[in-house]
Amino acid sequence: MHVRDYPARPLLGVGAVIFRGDDVLLIERGKPPLEGWWTLPGGLVEAGERLESAVVREVLEETGLLVKPTAIAAVFERIMPDADGRTEYHYVIIDYLCELVSGTLAAASDVAAAEWTPVGGFGRRKIAPGTPGVVRRALGLR
């Protein structure tokens, strides 16, 4: 069993909402949980790491892009029970609106794909629950 499976307490994560014109950056998760689902880039905060540093690191690791966090867009809770109703995954995710600084987009780390997606074009993808709401909140902060 992985450390993220059936945690004793919620795990803290960060995510990034990055816009380029009318597009938002989405990644396809390459590993559980939510393998094959599209969501925002991000991951877990390491012990001793500041939240904004974690979001910069995670985006760079997953997409090759350097970003600058500018505002908290949303605090999101993802609780995923197993077939028996036990909590298999529980994350508290702080999503940041980020500005793109530099880099060339390329899927890396635990990401199967990374693409700029029209904000209104989510319908053709298997989007992780909650992602559209976080993107809408971030749009209001632009």
Image (tube, grey):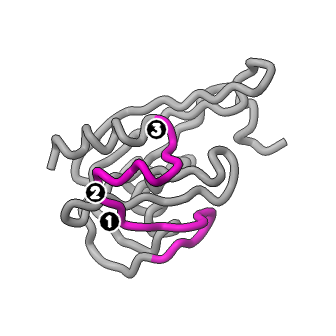
According to the picture, the residue beneath numbered tag 1 turns out to be 67
Q: Residue drawn 26% across and 72% down?
A: 101
From this view, report whether residue 73 is shown above or below residue 49. above
Q: Amino acid at mark 1?
A: Val
Query: Would you place residue 55 above or below residue 12 in this image?
Result: below
**What residue occupies the far bottom of the structure in this picture?**
104
- Which one is nearer the viewer's eye here, 28 or 86? 28
Q: Residues within 10 Å of mark 1 (few under 14, many from 20)?
A: many
| 74 w.r.t. 57: above or below | above
Kindly check if marks 2 and 3 are in contact, taking CB atoms under 8 A apart as contact: no
Q: Which quadrant of the rendered structure holds the N terminus? A: top right
Q: What distance separates the C-alpha of mark 2 from that of mark 1?
A: 6 Å
Earlier residue among tags 2 and 3: 3
**How far from the left and from the top, in percent, is residue 122?**
39, 50
Q: In whole angstroms, how far apart are the C-alphas of marks 3 and 1?
A: 18 Å
Position in image of residue 118 (x %, y %): 30, 59
CB-based contact (under 8 Å), mark 3 and mark 1? no
Q: CA distance from mark 2 to mark 3?
A: 15 Å
The residue carrying mark 2 is 98
Tell me the residue at 70%/41% (across/down).
4
